[in-house]
């Protein structure tokens, strides 16, 4: 804002005005912050605090109800932060005892857990400040100028059928043939895979050992190929044909772009969705990360590689020495290294590939153990908060992603804390119960309300608790070990593409939570007994019991996930209404529409009144952007106007057409969320309670045939180390705390 | 390069960027590979592309029309490709869509009427004799709901030779003939034509707003493409013939590799003027004729019927476009 011109010209005056205006804004912001600080630190008596809490909450409700706009969202985030900070400040200054007793020691532990939750809330809000959907960039009109791309499909132990689909769809990627090479990187060194690759006309790369698992596999392939860019798909992630044209524009627009990542979309139910019967009714566990966190941190140039469904620039990858091998989450670590070297990354929130979700709860837990250990390793070995090359927001974003995985201990503390008073008579929370309620309730209520607004489309309220509780016990030790000895431990793999033939109860996973639930239950009973004998302070007891009851609800829902349901199909069906045609024996045709499609067969709506006999043969054409190729099939059955067909032996060409029909359509996944209910905290809590209750009923009725092993799950390879489905905004323990 | 397909359009709309561009690279490569697999296809494509280099000056001669209706001539230089079937059922489909349609048979085989349930023995015909207007009106009234058909008429060889001589002398011969038969309120006039080049085929091509060229899914059909375009260029002044030509593959069976490649190649080499889907081979078509019924009645749930309605829609849209784009002042002859 320099006005050197001697005559005070109009632009110069305008410049001064602008500077003044800016100064005004800064002053206003400072004044605002000062006000908020005042709100945070001013102590109030019980009555005033209740009035303040209720008043602010009512105002927030009204404000939220009045508009969907982002200014209001920002205001609500600010309010939530202020209220939570006020709670934490009060907690710090008014409820902690300086003495060195067991009681006060436990009090500090609980406070520590709350502090962690508060920090994650803060980080979550901070990350979400800059949401904007990044759009694909146009490619140059001259196709001859497009860069060369190598597609890597790493595999280790997955079944061939899973890999075939991915390879055949990758071959249909809409990119000039002479600029596209596809490679199957087979760490299993299997003959059948080699001959399939030869038949499909793609490259096949093997190495003599399996050092560094998937990262080593990719790095080895890097030395054998020459494309300018590398697209990586885990062997179950099937790309749409438009994947490259959607992704590649950003590289041409920004010469420092190193990575374009797209979401991991799953067309089969994960263990939560399958075992609780929630498939497609609720956002999947990963949607918070891919639908909200990645797009948000993308604004800070901090979106990171998730191991699959991404394109990386070879030059950038070579500059950091290839895929990182120091940790078991090589993907996030590689991205971190590239960011440190000043490369950029982009996240496009457009599902352009789809894969199989983990097939069993045990596999899910195993996968998350790896992620959490890997992130903890990076935190120790290459901490994003320190070292060169990162912007502040990149540091914050990476740190948040990593710290997220340390929720194990805090969550277990919250689950166990309320038993301390009824069972042991310990007061680990030194405040009057009503006062604690008056401070804590607004803090919890605002965070639920604000999270539902910000993230309700990708994660329903309270489900975070269930997802995290389920893993808390299992990630606790790996993360701790990784913090102490980051170089220990090896890569485990996520099983995919198998099936569960008989339902069973996964005792291995549920065990610890059954114990914690039992503790809470016993504590409640004993508390009531104490009360009946007049031995307990009623208000403290009431709070403890309420807290335990909340824990029980979450624990019951968590344990319910351990009832592994049958997974009937080898290849999950994908819904798609596509025009199709039957060529019947005798030479007639019939116009129809598909309902769903799978590798083995499909169902169609046919005109009513036509009879079909089982085993009747025909060929079926499904019309997509590709050229028509009829597939031989036979009738399974026909009910009403729904005809189900099974495919007969398909040639490789026919198999490719089928794979492309199901998976290659550019719009295959755009209507996925259709028909899903909106989040509402109360109904979400109700639904969790109901799942928990029906679980209790099931536990009482059935003698669970304990153990896994009933699963004929196929082992799997070094899968994508997908990053944290980070709970962007993990909340503090959701229960009132009294003087316990 | 083929234009952006529906799936990509839907994707781009879903992310709020319908303006994004997409290149159907793979589809472009597919049709060239298809043509390379069969020498005749590759060679024919070369001839078509060479013809395209020949610039024909746009001419401003006045073109006349029959009434105010849109005329569609269904032609092919090879016999038996399904001209009559397409003409009859296209007319019927347009009629079902609520249009006033007349199908006229210009082929001495006099077979078009059979599709509409005529017996072939009727003495009524476009070319049989001079008829009084009341007689024509009475005839057309037979087809209340569906499209009306004007059969060629049962003619002897000598009579046909006479007609040929007459039409060779008088360039407006066919037009006058039609004007006497086609009522004013007609919206679509569909002409079934003979495979043989003749003066009145030339007049039909000149008359038509859309020339629908029917091809069999085979080498013989494909190889007629350059000759067809040459004929259109020669007979219809000002390059209008080529511009008005639309191509359609009939009796398509995707289980056969050659069928697939013929369609793919045709769509690739003449993308904007080829009906993308083809009409599938279906027994219901020949069975309908054997029952003297229209396919749209005989097998409403067949693929062919769905394709015929897509074809009718395509024809309506292109005809409308062509009328808009036509720089020629239209001379309406009208019915008398
Ligand atoms: N889509 C189709 N599927 C099956 N058969 C068909 C199809 N189209 C036409 N046909 C059959 O092909 C034969 C020839 O059809 P059509 O008479 O319509 O052809 P055309 O070109 O008019 O023949 P011509 O050159 O003799 O006039 C008929 O038996 C007809 O039923
Ligand atoms: Mg005919």
Image (cartoon, coloured by chain):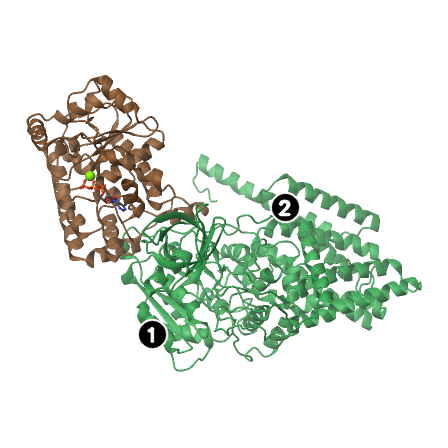
* Shade of chain A as shown in the rendered figure: green
> Mark 1 — residue?
A195
In the structure shown, which secondary structural element does the residue marked by tag 2 occupy?
A: helix
Residue A550 position in % (x across, y down): 74, 59
Q: Is the residue at mark 2 in contact range of ligand 1, meaning its CB lies under 8 Å from it?
A: no
Is residue A427 at least partly visible in the picture? no
Q: Position of residue B299 (x, y in %)?
A: 36, 42
* Quarter of the image where one finds residue A740: bottom right
Measure the alpha-carbon separation of dots 2 and 1. Answer: 60 Å
Question: Which residue corresponds to the image point at 65% horizontal and 74% vertical from the top-left?
Answer: A508
Which numbered disc covers residue A75? 2
Q: Does residue A292 appear in the picture of this structure?
A: yes
Foreground pick, A100 / A413: A413
| Residue A11 left/right relative to B282 | right
Which colour is chain B painted? brown
Q: Earlier in the sequence, mark 2 or mark 1?
A: 2
Q: Quadrant of ligand 1?
A: top left
* Residue at the image position 27 percent from the left and 62 percent from the top: A178
Q: Is residue A485 above or below residue A97?
A: below
> Label 1: few (<14), some or many (≥20) within 10 Å?
few
How many C-alpha atoms fall within 10 Å of the one at disc 2: few (<14), some, or many (≥20)?
Answer: some
Q: Position of residue B65 (x, y in %)?
A: 20, 25
């Amino acid at each position: 804002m320099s006005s050197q011109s001697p005559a005070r010209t109009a632009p110069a005056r305008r410049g001064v005005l602008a500077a003044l205006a800016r100064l005004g804004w800064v002053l206003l912001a400072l004044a605002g912050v000062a006000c908020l600080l005042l709100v945070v630190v001013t102590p109030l008596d019980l009555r005033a605090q209740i009035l303040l809490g209720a008043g602010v909450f009512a105002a927030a409700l009204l404000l939220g109800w009045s508009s969907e706009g982002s200014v209001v969202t920002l205001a609500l985030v600010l309010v939530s932060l202020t209220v939570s900070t006020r709670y934490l400040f009060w907690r710090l200054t008014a409820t902690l005892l300086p003495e060195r007793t067991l009681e006060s020691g436990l009090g500090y532990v609980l406070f520590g857990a709350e502090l962690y939750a508060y920090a994650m809330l803060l980080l979550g809000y901070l990350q979400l400040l800059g949401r904007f959907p990044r759009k694909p960039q146009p490619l140059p009109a001259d196709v001859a100028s497009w860069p060369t791309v190598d597609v890597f499909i790493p595999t280790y132990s997955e079944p061939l059928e899973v890999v075939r689909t991915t390879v055949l769809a990758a071959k249909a990627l809409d990119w000039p043939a002479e600029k596209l090479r596809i490679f199957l990187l087979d760490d299993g060194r299997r003959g059948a895979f080699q001959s399939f690759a030869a038949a499909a006309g793609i490259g096949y790369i093997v190495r003599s050992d399996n050092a560094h698992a998937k990262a080593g596999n990719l790095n080895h392939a890097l030395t054998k190929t020459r494309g300018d860019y590398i697209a990586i798909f885990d062997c179950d992630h099937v790309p749409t044909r438009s994947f490259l044209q959607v992704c590649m524009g950003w590289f041409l627009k920004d010469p420092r772009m190193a990575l374009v990542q797209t979401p991991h979309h799953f067309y089969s139910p994960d263990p939560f969705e399958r075992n609780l019967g929630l498939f497609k009714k609720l956002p999947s566990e990963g949607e918070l990360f891919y639908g909200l966190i990645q797009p948000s941190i993308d604004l800070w140039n901090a979106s990171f590689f998730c191991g699959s469904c991404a394109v990386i620039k070879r030059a950038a990858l070579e500059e950091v020495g290839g895929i990182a091998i120091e940790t078991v989450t090589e993907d996030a670590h590689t991205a971190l290294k590239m960011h440190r070297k000043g490369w950029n990354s982009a996240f496009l929130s457009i599902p352009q590939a789809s894969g199989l979700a983990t097939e069993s709860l045990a596999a899910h837990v195993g996968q998350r153990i790896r992620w959490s250990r890997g992130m903890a390793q990076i935190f120790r070995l290459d901490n994003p908060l320190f070292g060169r090359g990162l912007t502040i927001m990149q540091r914050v974003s990476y740190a948040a992603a990593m710290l997220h995985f340390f929720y194990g201990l805090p969550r277990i503390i919250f689950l166990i804390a309320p038993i301390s008073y009824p069972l042991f008579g310990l007061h680990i929370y030194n405040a009057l119960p009503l006062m604690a309620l008056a401070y804590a309730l607004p803090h919890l209520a605002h965070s639920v309300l604000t999270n539902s607004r910000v993230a309700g489309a990708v994660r329903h309220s309270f489900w975070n608790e269930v997802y995290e509780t389920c893993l808390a016990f299992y990630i606790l030790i790996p993360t701790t070990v990784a913090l102490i000895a980051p170089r220990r431990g090896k890569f485990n793999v996520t099983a995919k593409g198998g099936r569960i033939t008989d339902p069973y109860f996964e005792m291995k996973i549920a065990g610890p939570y059954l114990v914690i639930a039992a503790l809470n239950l016993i504590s409640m009973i004993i508390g009531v007994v104490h009360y009946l004998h007049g031995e307990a302070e009623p208000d403290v007891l009431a709070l403890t019991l309420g807290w335990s009851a909340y824990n029980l609800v979450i624990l019951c829902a968590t344990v319910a996930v351990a009832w592994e349901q049958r997974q009937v199909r080898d290849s999950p069906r994908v819904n798609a209404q596509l025009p199709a045609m039957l060529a019947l024996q005798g030479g007639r045709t019939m116009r129809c529409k598909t309902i769903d499609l799978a590798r083995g067969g499909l169902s169609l709506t046919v005109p009513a009144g036509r009879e079909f006999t089982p085993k009747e043969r025909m060929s079926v054409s499904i019309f997509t952007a590709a050229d028509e190729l009829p597939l031989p099939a036979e009738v399974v059955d026909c009910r009403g106007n729904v005809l189900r067909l099974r495919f007969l032996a398909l040639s490789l060409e026919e198999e490719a057409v089928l794979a492309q029909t199901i998976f290659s359509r550019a719009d295959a996944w755009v209507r996925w969320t259709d028909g899903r209910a909106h989040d509402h905290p109360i109904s979400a809590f109700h639904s969790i309670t109901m799942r928990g209750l029906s679980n209790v009923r099931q536990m009482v009725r059935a003698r669970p045939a304990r153990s896994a092993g009933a699963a004929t799950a196929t082992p799997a390879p070094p899968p994508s180390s997908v990053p944290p489905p980070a709970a962007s905004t993990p909340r503090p323990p959701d229960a009132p705390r009294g003087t316990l | 390069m083929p234009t952006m397909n529906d799936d990509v359009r839907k994707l781009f709309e879903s992310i709020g960027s319908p303006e994004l561009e997409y290149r159907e690279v793979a589809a472009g490569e597919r049709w060239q590979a298809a043509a390379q697999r069969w020498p005749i296809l590759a060679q024919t494509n070369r001839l078509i592309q060479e013809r395209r280099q020949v610039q024909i000056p746009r001419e401003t001669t006045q073109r006349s029309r029959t009434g105010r209706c849109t005329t569609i001539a269904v032609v092919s230089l090879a016999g038996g490709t399904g001209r009559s079937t397409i003409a009859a059922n296209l007319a019927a489909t347009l009629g079902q869509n609520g249009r006033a349609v007349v199908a006229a048979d210009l082929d001495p085989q006099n077979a078009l009427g059979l599709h509409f349930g005529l017996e072939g023995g009727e003495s009524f015909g476009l070319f049989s004799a001079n008829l009084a207007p009341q007689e024509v009106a009475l005839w057309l009234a037979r087809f209340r709901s569906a499209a009306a058909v004007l059969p060629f008429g049962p003619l002897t060889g000598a009579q046909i030779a006479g007609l040929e001589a007459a039409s060779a002398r008088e360039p407006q011969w066919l037009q006058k003939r039609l004007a006497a038969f086609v009522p004013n309120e007609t919206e679509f006039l569909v002409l079934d034509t003979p495979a043989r080049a003749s003066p009145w085929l030339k007049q039909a091509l000149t008359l038509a707003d859309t020339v629908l060229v029917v091809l069999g899914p085979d080498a013989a059909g494909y190889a007629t493409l350059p000759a067809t375009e040459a004929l259109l260029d020669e007979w219809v002044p000002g390059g209008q013939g080529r511009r008005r030509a639309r191509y359609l593959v009939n009796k398509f069976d995707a289980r056969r590799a050659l069928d697939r490649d013929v369609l793919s190649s045709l769509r690739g080499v003449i993308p904007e003027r080829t009906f993308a889907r083809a009409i599938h081979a279906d027994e219901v078509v020949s069975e309908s004729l054997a029952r003297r019924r229209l396919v749209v009645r005989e097998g409403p749930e067949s693929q062919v019927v769905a394709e015929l309605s897509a074809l009718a829609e395509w024809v309506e849209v292109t005809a409308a476009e062509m009328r808009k784009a036509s720089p020629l002042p239209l001379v309406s002859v009208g019915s008398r």
